[in-house]
Each structure stands twice: as structure tokens, then as C-alpha cells.
């Protein structure tokens, strides 16, 4: 891995500068011009999306390393403004630029209070998320990571529901605890590297013993695990989702959570491979607990937004499982599943928002039978549900199938033969396909079907043109990924394979050095063979 | 016009119904009823035409093709790591038969629906879902890879869900749809696990011909790791018990009768529910390697056949009788597959598609005529008013009852014969099991004749028991399919006559099943087969005679007296052995309790209450003492922050 291509034109910078420019422009618009705020915000985010299309077009799927790299000096002590994109970040960048305009459009009617500040927050959020994804410098990454918190905190705390202050403070404190430890980790890495550099590519070369790696993995991993969120660090999520306005929930679930999973894949695993290996099984265990536990708790909810929030815990359990299975198909499946979750859970929150705007309640029991007055809504809710429960033909299936396939391959024919623990985890994770159907279809039945029991639901207006447009766009992507996943997988495979090869190579190198020192002899010969085979793979 | 290739035609077979589903689905509010009908019925008819055309082109070529098969690769679907799956269609003798059954019966049922659903406000949605079902079912039978089969497998489950709950205003119907989906998903869980073990433990392939070649290699894991092959085939069978409604996952099918009656005919009788049987037949080469699995399959099939038949004896809802009958007949097919009679199992699948579709559509015609009445105790005397419905229903009833020379007679007989003579080459399956299976199957055959003719007599004979009924014969769009299906019910058996020289069926399917059947030592002579035909004829006729005596003849007061004298048994049967109640108590409620407690105790209590908010409360209490440090001086805070950070960094480095 390394730098493959440098950008002739700074496309990446342009993509993240456009929302920032929009935010600055908004600051100049008078406070009472709500329509102008919305238009500027939508235009800026659409411009960023168009700019990102040129990233997609100029991205060469055959290359494993970073592409379209820009590199400039930034701070005195070696921190640089280095950005680039590879197969691991590309899909998430596209997801961010795709989802943000839809989200802004979804808030057209819902947010009427302090529209200027709201849209500034949305655009700053978009820019900081993009920055987090493309940063190739650890300090730059951290700065974007921290900036990201502020607009989200404000979106929950200012435009949220009744308990918004509690939820916002909880969100902020929880994620800050993680961030502080990660900051310490980054500084430690900087000091260990000894080259006055925060560059990601230099960090990859830093030599760390197992003990150092374990501490650093824990420091980074906690920050990421909270963000994912991995069980049992998830309890901030339902509160944040329930209190956040619809647009906040969509971005939070759609993109922000992926910063945690992305962080594992970009930093925690490749920088600390031995520790990642040591932590793999416990992390996968928590991931599988998340799948089963999240599904059960989702089933018990009577608030539809909370149900969707807990379903996220289950879905991201799949993502974490695939990532730590560390096989090509599982990791690619888990990247795709991050996108899938952004699309389908984003759509679910939008759908919940459509209901909320009409009835001002999120209680499942307040609905029932609304498929009759809201036919188009019912269509979108059913399709999104199918995507969420991974029906073949939709995007959800591809992700879950690849994650489970990779987990089973590692369990059944990994280098060490059959791994019973991993096999058990795979089997338990597979029950997620049944559990997902149970809680989602139960919710759909209670909301959409049966007789109408509340008279006020008789005449609910169906989705408007604007709402329909947003949902239709997402639905197209649901089927696009489901039917032609290779358009996406072909762009992740080179980078993922290189990452895994480097990971396995480094891990084996370390072990062999230690084994040679400790006990040279015939016992490590088969190990060497296995190692060679892995590197060759 | 140049002749299209077989590959193109196969794509048309699958895509025409998809196109119909999309157009009728998206333009449901715009199109006229007539356009919807033309598109809705046109789509499966086009598929039927394309399938026929493809098969006619393929027939003269097939002898020269490997496995007599044509593959149409549409595109590479998934590629990641070692996982590479093509979306490809496969025409071989088995899929040809299945595609014809599906498109033929499917087209007739679409046509019938034009009349049956005529007044429904969601007419376009109905046809959209029904076309989508055709798409998924054709993908299932034509898919070359198990992964493509699985797309269809889950797709038909989805359509079943949508169509059972078609009248979603009714809570019971919506719940029945959800139940069908979830029970099927439990089966699919097994199926999915099987795929992974197949891929990664046996080094197999999801591509069926490749898999077959791998199995043929004596050094492959398939021939050395018997335990794993047994596990894989059993897991696949879990999927089949869901889709093909076998014990213990059959519980969704009786409830599925909540859907419109043509849906019951197409999905829940003729096609989708046979998918499990098809899958086992498709993987016959795998099953013959696992004698234990075969014995399990046969046992479950035989048990389901008699279990469901016994429930069918006492049901009073015309569709429920047919539903339990379907479960029972599927048991026969599964039994056939379990005893290695794959050809016979699929043969019964085909004849059953005709006679059971005919029966369901006949029932639909009756329900239509009686404005929704489904209780057979309130029917009677319909023969006079509905001649087409009556005669076609009678033919199909005779066919399912096993009256000699009609289709069901031949196919059922074939399975009975093979059940008695099955010997697995390994010798693992003990011979007494054959006797048990045979006894169960014969008992089920007697019950079938009895409950079917009970149904026939109660509905069509005698006088009407409902003074308010004004029945009328159904329109031509409904009676024409009935006539065609009745003709099929009568004649479809003649492709599989019990004589090697006349058995076109076995000969045609030999490329698919020939190899597997070699692994099975079927003993038994021709004479035995003819003797068995005599036995089953006697059984069928006795069942019919008994039904006559009980429901038309002198014994008319006997059913009530029997019910009274064996009240316990009668109650148990009427309540379907209380299986739904048992599942609710043993599975559903405990899971719900777990969900509730996981949320209240673990999530809200332990994790959030104690571990997260606990320290926060503690800090906030301590904070009371620290408050005097909080001066509100921002610069002091910043200095303290910087100092603290420096200390941390210093300590760590």
C-alpha cells in the first residue's frame, strides 16, 4: 500500500470545500430568509455530490493504494494536510455526498426553527465527515473527527425532541471519552514513530511490540467501538436517535456511525495487527451479541424510532463481525453493509419521520392499517424492510451473505483448520436473518396492516412529491446494489486484498521474529509454511 | 425473423413476468382494468410460450449436450474473494418439466383470476404480486446455482407473504402472512448454513453441475466425510420443511389460506410449496450419499402425509380441508424423494399441480358463487347449479383419491412401490422402516379418499343447507381453466405408466436422476408393482365407499355419533393436535419474554442505568463539592485542560 496517484485537480478538497463554502455563504444570509437557507444548503450539498461523482469516475478500481492524493504542509510539528481515497473509503465518501442532499431535502418542512443555523450545522457536518474519511494524516483525521461532534451535538440538542438535552449531553460525553483516549494514542504513535510525522503511511511502518499494540488498539478501539456502537457501548444511540430530528437521525445512522467501523478498518486493524488478531475473537463475540441482543431489544420496543435504533445495533454487529473475520469477502461485505445500512436505515428513519410529521407520535400503537390511506408510503416501507432484513435482490442480502460466507470460511477452512468458537459465532450470527424478519415484519404489520383503529389515521395524506422523490432515490439504490453489487465490490476488492495481505504479512513477521528468538527449531517450520501461503494469497 | 437462441428465450421466460410485475405495480393507479388484465395474464403466457419454444429448440439438441443441459449466463452477480456467483439459467430435463408446470398452471390461474378478482379494488396490485411470484418461481426452477435458486426461494416466500396478506385490512390475514414469512425464514436459516458448509467444509460449489462433478470424484470430501454430507443434506432439508410445509414447520400453510383462492391454488398448492421437493430432487446426487438423511426425509414425509390427512378428516372450511390435503400430498412427494424415487416424487408433484390447482380453483368457484361462504356445513346441492365446477371438481377428487387410471393413481402408486422396495446400497437404513413408511402412506391414502369424498358429497350432493344461497356458475374465464386442469388431472399420469418401455417420464429424466438411482438397490418385481396397484385401488375405493356411507348413505348419523363417543380425539383433530398452541407456549412466548426482559433489565437497567448513568450520577454528586472550582473563567478552564493533557501525554510517553 502507498500512494498510487496524485490529483491533478484537487477533487477531494473541492468536494469537502463545497459544503464548507455553502456554510460560509449561509452565515451571510439574513436570519429570517428560511427558503434561501434551504436552497443554498441543498445547492451546496448537491454540488458536493456532483464533485464526488468525478471521484467515482476518476477512481481506478485496479489500484490498491491511495488515489487522487493531495499533500500540503499544515502545522509546524509535522502534521500535514494529506487527503486521498482508496477502495476502503470510496464507497463511504459516495454514501456521504449522496445521503446529505436527500437529508437536507427531508428537513424542508420539518425544520422551521433557526433554519440558518440548522443548515450550517448540516453542511459543516458533511464536510467534517468527508474530511474524516479522506484524511491520510492522523492529526488531520482527529481534527475532523472532533469537529464532527459539534454540529451533531447541536442538531440533537437544539432541534431535537423533549429530552434533547439529556440525549445530546449523553452523546457528547460518551463520544468524547472515546476521543480523548484516541488522542493520547495518536500522540504516543507520533512519539514512537520518531519521524515528526502524523502521516498514516508512516504510522503503518511504526514498529510496535505486542504490549504497545494492545494498549493502542484499546485506546483507538474504544473510541471506534462507542461510535459504531458495539455492544455494550450502545445505550447512547437509542436516546440520540429518538431525540434527534429526522434529518439528524438519518445522518447519524447513515454516515456517522460508520466512522466507527471505518476507523477500525482504516486504523485499528492495520496499525496494530497483532493486537487486532488478539482482540478479534472478543470483538466478534460482542458483535454477535449485538446482532442477537439488538434484535431482541428491537422486538420489544413500542416506539418505532427506538426499534430502528436498536436494529442498527444488530446491523452494525454484522459489519463488525465481517470486518474481524478478516477474509476478503467478509471485509468487502462489511464495507458494503456499511453502505447498505446507510441506505436502508436512513430510509427507515425518513419513513418514521414521514409518520411523525403527520401524527406527532412515534408509538407503534398509534398507527395500524395505514397502508390504505398511504399506499405509496406502504410500498416504500415494505421495500425498505425487505432491504433491512436482507432479502436476495436487495442490497442487504449481499452484505449479510458475504459477511457470513467469510466468517464461515475462516471458521471452517482457515489456516488453523476448523475453529469451533468462530463456527459457533457464525451460526449464532446467522439467526439474525430470522430475528430481523421477526421484529421488522411485526412492526410493519402493526403500522401498515389490520383495520384502522384510530380515526385520525383514516385520512392521512400519502407521501408528498418531495418525500416520494427522496424515498424513490434510495429505493433505486437498494435494488442497484442488490442486483449489480459488482459495480461496488470491484472497487473495494483491490484495497481490501492489499490491506489483508499487509495485515497478515505483518502479523506473521512479528510472530516469526519472536519465535526465532525464543525457540528456533523445527516447531516453527509449519508455521513458516502457513505464513508463506498466507502472504502469497 | 431469425430464430432466437435458447439462452435468449430462457431470459424471456424469467423476465417477462418481472416486467409485468413492474409495469402493473408502478402504474397501478393509471392503467385501466382491461390493460391490467392483458398485461397480467400476458406475462405468464409469454413465459409459457418462450419456455415451450426453448424446449422445442432444445429437445433435438439435448442428446449431444453435456448433462443434456443448456446454460444461459446473464451476468456475474457477486464476486468477492473466492466467492464468485453467476446469475445463470439452466435448462435440463428437470428444469424443463418444472418450467412447463409452473408456466402452464400459472397461466391458467392468472386467467382464472381475471374473473375471480374482478371486483377487487386492488386489482393491479394483485396481478403485480402474482407476476412477481412467477418471476421468482421461474428463477428458482431455472437457476443454475444454488445461490440463484435461493433468490427465487426467498422471492416466492416474499410473494407468498404479500399475497396471503393481500386483504391486509383484516388483521388475521396480515398475521397469517407474517407467520408464513417467519416460519419460512427459519427454514432458510438452515438452508443458508448448508450452503456455507457445502462451500467451505466440503470444498463444494453452489453451481449445481460443478457440484455434481465434484461429488463424482471419489477422492473428494463428499465421499470421505460422510458426517458432513449428512449434516449438509439435513440442513438443506430444514429449508425444505419450511417451504414444502413438512413437520415441524408446516404450521404456516393452513393459515396461508387467508389469501385469495387463486393464490392458494398457484402458490400454496401447485408450485411454491413443491420447491423443497424440487430442491431435494435437484440435489439427488448429494442425498444418495447420505442414507441417514434419506431416512429422515422419508420418515418426515410419511409422518406428515398421515398426520395432515388425519386433520383433514374433520375440518369444515373448504379451503382448510384442501390445505391439509396439500400438506399431506407434499408429504408423499417428500417420502418419494426420501426413498430415492426422485422421478416419482417429481411425477407426483406434476400430477398434484393439476389436480390440486383444479380443486382449489373449484373451491374458489364455489366460494365465489356463495359470496364468500367457506363452511361446508352450510353448502350442499351445488351440483345442480354449477355443472362445470362440479364435474371438474369430481374428476380432480377422483384423481387425488387414487381412482385407477387417473393421474394421481399412477404417481401415488409409483411412490408406494418405491417405498416398499427401497434399499440404500450402504445398508444403513433398516428394512423395517420401509414397512412403517409404507403403512403410514397407505393409511394416508385411505384417509385421502375419505376426506376428499366427504368434501365432495357435502358440497355438491344432496340439498342446500343454506336457504339464503343463490349459487350460479362462474364465468368462462374461471371455468375454462377448470376444464383444462381437470383434463390434466385425468390424463397427466399417462406419461409415467408403470412399465419401463412405456414410462416416458423416467426415461426423460434419466440424465438427472439416473446416476443417483444406481446407488439405490431397489428390489421388487413387476408383479409386486401390479399387486400394489390392486391394493391401492382397493384402498381408494374403500375410502370412497366409506365416505358415501357416512355422508350420503345409511351411516349419515355415524359421524356425529363417532364425534360424540370419541370427543377427546375429535377435539384434538379439530384443533389440529394443538400444535399452534404448543408452539406459542414453548417458543413464541419465551422469546417475547426474553425480548422484554433484555430491554427492561439488561439495557435500561444494567447497561444504561448502572454502568453508564451510574458513574455520571456519582460524578454529579461529587461535583457538588467541586462546584467551587467552577468559576466560569474560560481561560482558567483552557489552562487546566492544556495542563491536564500535557500531564497525560507526559505520563504515557
Image (spheres, helix red, strand yellow):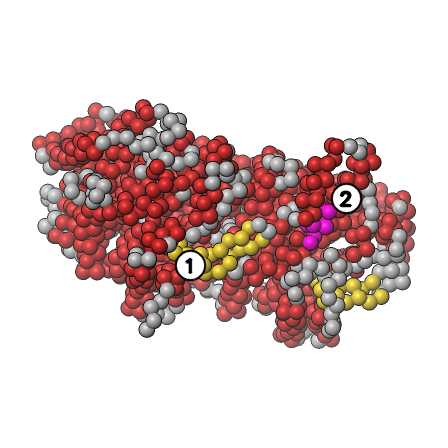
* Residue A87 vertical placement versus B439 (above, below): below
Direction from residue A494 to residue B526 in the image, left or right: left
Classify the position of the N terminus of chain A by image quarter.
bottom right
At 39% across and 61% down in the image, what residue appears?
B7
Segment tinted magenta in the rendering: A498-505
Describe the element under mark 1 as helix, strand or loop. Answer: strand
Q: Position of residue A152 (x, y in %)?
A: 69, 58
At 42% across and 39% down in the image, what residue appears?
B286
Q: Position of residue A256 (x, y in %)?
A: 67, 56
Name the residue tied to disc 1.
B72
Q: Nearer the viewer, residue B478 or B506?
A: B506
Do pointers 2 and 1 mark residues of a single chain? no
Q: Nearer the viewer, residue B424 or A229?
A: B424
Describe the element under mark 2 as helix, strand or loop. Answer: helix
Q: Position of residue B262 (x, y in %)?
A: 28, 53
Q: Nearer the viewer, residue B34 or B419?
A: B419
Query: Residue A200 magenta-drawn?
Result: no
Direction from residue A164 to residue A173 in the image, left or right: right
**Could you tell me what secondary structure mostly forms the magenta stretch?**
helix
Tell me how far mark 2 sits from mark 1, CA to CA: 47 Å
- Chain letter for mark 2, please: A
Amino acid at each position: 500500500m502507498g500512494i498510487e496517484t496524485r490529483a491533478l485537480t484537487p477533487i477531494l478538497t473541492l468536494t469537502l470545500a463545497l459544503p464548507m463554502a455553502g456554510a460560509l455563504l449561509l452565515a451571510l444570509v439574513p436570519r429570517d430568509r428560511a427558503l434561501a437557507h434551504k436552497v443554498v444548503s441543498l445547492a451546496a450539498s448537491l454540488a458536493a455530490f456532483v464533485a464526488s461523482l468525478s471521484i467515482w469516475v476518476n477512481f481506478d478500481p485496479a489500484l490498491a493504494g491511495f488515489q487522487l492524493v493531495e499533500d500540503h504542509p499544515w502545522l509546524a510539528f509535522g502534521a500535514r494536510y494529506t487527503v486521498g481515497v482508496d477502495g476502503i473509503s470510496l464507497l463511504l465518501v459516495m454514501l456521504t455526498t449522496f445521503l446529505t442532499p436527500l437529508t437536507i431535502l427531508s428537513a424542508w418542512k420539518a425544520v422551521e426553527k433557526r433554519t440558518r443555523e440548522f443548515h450550517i450545522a448540516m453542511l459543516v457536518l458533511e464536510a467534517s465527515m468527508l474530511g474524516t474519511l479522506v484524511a491520510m494524516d492522523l492529526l488531520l483525521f482527529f481534527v475532523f473527527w472532533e469537529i464532527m461532534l459539534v454540529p451533531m451535538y447541536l442538531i440533537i440538542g437544539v432541534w431535537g425532541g423533549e429530552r434533547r438535552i439529556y440525549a445530546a449531553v449523553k452523546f457528547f460525553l460518551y463520544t468524547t471519552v472515546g476521543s480523548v483516549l484516541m488522542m493520547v494514542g495518536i500522540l504516543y504513535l507520533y512519539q514512537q514513530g520518531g519521524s515528526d510525522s502524523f502521516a498514516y503511511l508512516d504510522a503503518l511502518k511504526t514498529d510496535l511490540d505486542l504490549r504497545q499494540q494492545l494498549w493502542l488498539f484499546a485506546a483507538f478501539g474504544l473510541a471506534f467501538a462507542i461510535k459504531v456502537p458495539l455492544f455494550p457501548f450502545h445505550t447512547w444511540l437509542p436516546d440520540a436517535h429518538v431525540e434527534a430530528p429526522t434529518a439528524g437521525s438519518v445522518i447519524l445512522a447513515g454516515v456517522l456511525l460508520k466512522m466507527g467501523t471505518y476507523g477500525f478498518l482504516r486504523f485499528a486493524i492495520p496499525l496494530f495487527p497483532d493486537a487486532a488478531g488478539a482482540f478479534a475473537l472478543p470483538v466478534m463475540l460482542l458483535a454477535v451479541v449485538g446482532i442477537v441482543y439488538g434484535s431482541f431489544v428491537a422486538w420489544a420496543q413500542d416506539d418505532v424510532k427506538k426499534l430502528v435504533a436498536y436494529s442498527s445495533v444488530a446491523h452494525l454487529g454484522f459489519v463488525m463481525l465481517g470486518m474481524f473475520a478478516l477474509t476478503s469477502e467478509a471485509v468487502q461485505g462489511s464495507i458494503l453493509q456499511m453502505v447498505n445500512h446507510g441506505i436502508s436505515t436512513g430510509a427507515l428513519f425518513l419513513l418514521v419521520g414521514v409518520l411523525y410529521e403527520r401524527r406527532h407520535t412515534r408509538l407503534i400503537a398509534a398507527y395500524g392499517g395505514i397502508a390504505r390511506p398511504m399506499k405509496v408510503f406502504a410500498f416504500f416501507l415494505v421495500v425498505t424492510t425487505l432491504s433491512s432484513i436482507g432479502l436476495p435482490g436487495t442490497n442487504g442480502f449481499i452484505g449479510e451473505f458475504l459477511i457470513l460466507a467469510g466468517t464461515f470460511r475462516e471458521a471452517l477452512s482457515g489456516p488453523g483448520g476448523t475453529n469451533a468458537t468462530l463456527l459457533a459465532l457464525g451460526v449464532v450470527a446467522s439467526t439474525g436473518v430470522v430475528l430481523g424478519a421477526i421484529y421488522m415484519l411485526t412492526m410493519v404489520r402493526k403500522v401498515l396492516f389490520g383495520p384502522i383503529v384510530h380515526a385520525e389515521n383514516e385520512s392521512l395524506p400519502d407521501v408528498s412529491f418531495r418525500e416520494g422523490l427522496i424515498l424513490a432515490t434510495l429505493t433505486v439504490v437498494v435494488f442497484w446494489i442488490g442486483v449489480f453489487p459488482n459495480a461496488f465490490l470491484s472497487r473495494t476488492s483491490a484495497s481490501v486484498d492489499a490491506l489483508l495481505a499487509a495485515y497478515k504479512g505483518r502479523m506473521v513477521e512479528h510472530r516469526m521474529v519472536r519465535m526465532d528468538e525464543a525457540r528456533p527449531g523445527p516447531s516453527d517450520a509449519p508455521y513458516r509454511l502457513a505464513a508463506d501461503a498466507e502472504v502469497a494469497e | 425473423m431469425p430464430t432466437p437462441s435458447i439462452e435468449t428465450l430462457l431470459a424471456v421466460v424469467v423476465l417477462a413476468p418481472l416486467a409485468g410485475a413492474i409495469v402493473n405495480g408502478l402504474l397501478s393507479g393509471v392503467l385501466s382494468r382491461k390493460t391490467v388484465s392483458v398485461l397480467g395474464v400476458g406475462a405468464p403466457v409469454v413465459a409459457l410460450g418462450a419456455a415451450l419454444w426453448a424446449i422445442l429448440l432444445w429437445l433435438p439438441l439435448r442428446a449431444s449436450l453435456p448433462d443434456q443441459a443448456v446454460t444461459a449466463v446473464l451476468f456475474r452477480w457477486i464476486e468477492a474473494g473466492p466467492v464468485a456467483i453467476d446469475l445463470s439459467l439452466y435448462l435440463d430435463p428437470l428444469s424443463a418439466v418444472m418450467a412447463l408446470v409452473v408456466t402452464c398452471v400459472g397461466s391458467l390461474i392468472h386467467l382464472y383470476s381475471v374473473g375471480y378478482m374482478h371486483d377487487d379494488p386492488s386489482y393491479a396490485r394483485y396481478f403485480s404480486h402474482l407476476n412477481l411470484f412467477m418471476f421468482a418461481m421461474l428463477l428458482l426452477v431455472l437457476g443454475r446455482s444454488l445461490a440463484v435458486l435461493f433468490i427465487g426461494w426467498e422471492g416466492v416466500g416474499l410473494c407468498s407473504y404479500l399475497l396471503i396478506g393481500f386483504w391486509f385490512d383484516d388483521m388475521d390475514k396480515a398475521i397469517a402472512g407474517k407467520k408464513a414469512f417467519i416460519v419460512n425464514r427459519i427454514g432458510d436459516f438452515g438452508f443458508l448454513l448448508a450452503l456455507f458448509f457445502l462451500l467451505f467444509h466440503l470444498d463444494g460449489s453452489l453451481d449445481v453441475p460443478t457440484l455434481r462433478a465434484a461429488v463424482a470424484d471419489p477422492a473428494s470430501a463428499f465421499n470421505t466425510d460422510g458426517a458432513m454430507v449428512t449434516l449438509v443434506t439435513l440442513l438443506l432439508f430444514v429449508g425444505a420443511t419450511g417451504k414444502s410445509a413438512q413437520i415441524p414447520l408446516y404450521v404456516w400453510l393452513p393459515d396461508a389460506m387467508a389469501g385469495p383462492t387463486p393464490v392458494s391454488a398457484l402458490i400454496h398448492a401447485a408450485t411454491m410449496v413443491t420447491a423443497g421437493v424440487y430442491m431435494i430432487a435437484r440435489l439427488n446426487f448429494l442425498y444418495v450419499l447420505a442414507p441417514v438423511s434419506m431416512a429422515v426425509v422419508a420418515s418426515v414425509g410419511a409422518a406428515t402425509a398421515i398426520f395432515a390427512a388425519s386433520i383433514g378428516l374433520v375440518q369444515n372450511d373448504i379451503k382448510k380441508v384442501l390445505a391439509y390435503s396439500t400438506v399431506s400430498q407434499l408429504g408423499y412427494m417428500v417420502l418419494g424423494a426420501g426413498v430415492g424415487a426422485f422421478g416419482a416424487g417429481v411425477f407426483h408433484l406434476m400430477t398434484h399441480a393439476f389436480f390440486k390447482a383444479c380443486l382449489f380453483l373449484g373451491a374458489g368457484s364455489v366460494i365465489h358463487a356463495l359470496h364468500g361462504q367457506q363452511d361446508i356445513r352450510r353448502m350442499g346441492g351445488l351440483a345442480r347449479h354449477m355443472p362445470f365446477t362440479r364435474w371438474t371438481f369430481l374428476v380432480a377428487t377422483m384423481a387425488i383419491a387414487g381412482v385407477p387410471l387417473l393421474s394421481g393413481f399412477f404417481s401415488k402408486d409409483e411412490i408406494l412401490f418405491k417405498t416398499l422396495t427401497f434399499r440404500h446400497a450402504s445398508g444403513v437404513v433398516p428394512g423395517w422402516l420401509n414397512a412403517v413408511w409404507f403403512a403410514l402412506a397407505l393409511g394416508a391414502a385411505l384417509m385421502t379418499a375419505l376426506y376428499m369424498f366427504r368434501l365432495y358429497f357435502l358440497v355438491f350432493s344432496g340439498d342446500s343447507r343454506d336457504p339464503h344461497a343463490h349459487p350460479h356458475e362462474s364465468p368462462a374465464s374461471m371455468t375454462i381453466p377448470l376444464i383444462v386442469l381437470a383434463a390434466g388431472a385425468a390424463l397427466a399420469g399417462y406419461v409415467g405408466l408403470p412399465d419401463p418401455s412405456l414410462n416416458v417420464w423416467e426415461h426423460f429424466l434419466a440424465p438427472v436422476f439416473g446416476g443417483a438411482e444406481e446407488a439405490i438397490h431397489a428390489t421388487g418385481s413387476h408383479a409386486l408393482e401390479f399387486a400394489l396397484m390392486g391394493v391401492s385401488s382397493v384402498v381408494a375405493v374403500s375410502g370412497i365407499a366409506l365416505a358415501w356411507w357416512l355422508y350420503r348413505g345409511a351411516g349419515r348419523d355415524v359421524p356425529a355419533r363417532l364425534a360424540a363417543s370419541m370427543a377427546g380425539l375429535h377435539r384434538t383433530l379439530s384443533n389440529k393436535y394443538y400444535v399452534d398452541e404448543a408452539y406459542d407456549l414453548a417458543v413464541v412466548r419465551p422469546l417475547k419474554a426474553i425480548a422484554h426482559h433484555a430491554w427492561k433489565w439488561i439495557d435500561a437497567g444494567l447497561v444504561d442505568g448502572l454502568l453508564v448513568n451510574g458513574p455520571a450520577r456519582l460524578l454529579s454528586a461529587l461535583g457538588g463539592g467541586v462546584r467551587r472550582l467552577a468559576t466560569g473563567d474560560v481561560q482558567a478552564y483552557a489552562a487546566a485542560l492544556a495542563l491536564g493533557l500535557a500531564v497525560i501525554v507526559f505520563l504515557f510517553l
